[in-house]
Amino acid sequence: MWNFEYLSIIVMPVSLLSGTKPLGRPRITWLSTVQQDLKQHHLMLPEAADLAQNRPLWRMMSTYGATQS
């Protein structure tokens, strides 16, 4: 007699191997790096784009951020 609970434990991992999971760590993109940097300043990407239109203010923010890292 087969113990079907035990058999399902053995067979389950084999069925999971047929998936298409990518190998390795996900790539770090330029955009994700920018979003992480903006998160440290409590900004979102659209807010930063609006802020970048004011060049003197943006220069002050970016210089402050570079010295505090």
Image (cartoon, helix red, strand yellow):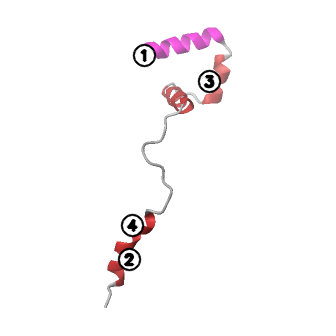
Q: Is residue 12 above or below residue 33?
A: below
Q: Position of residue 61 (x, y in %)?
A: 54, 15
Q: Quadrant of the N terminus?
A: bottom left
- SS for dot 4: helix
Taking the spot 49% from the left edge, 38% from the top edge, the residue there is 27
Mark 4 → mark 2, Cα distance in angstroms: 9 Å
Does residue 8 show up magenta in the picture? no
Q: Which residue is labeled 1 in the image?
A: 68
Taking the spot 35% from the left edge, 73% from the top edge, the residue there is 9
- SS for dot 3: helix
- Region rendered in magenta: 55-69
Q: Which residue is labeled 3 in the image?
A: 48
Mark 3 → mark 4, Cα distance in angstroms: 46 Å
Q: In terms of secondary structure, what is the magenta stretch mainly?
A: helix
Residue 8 is labelled as: 2
Tell us which disc is closer to us: 3 or 2. Answer: 2
Residue 13 is labelled as: 4
Residue 7 is labelled as: none
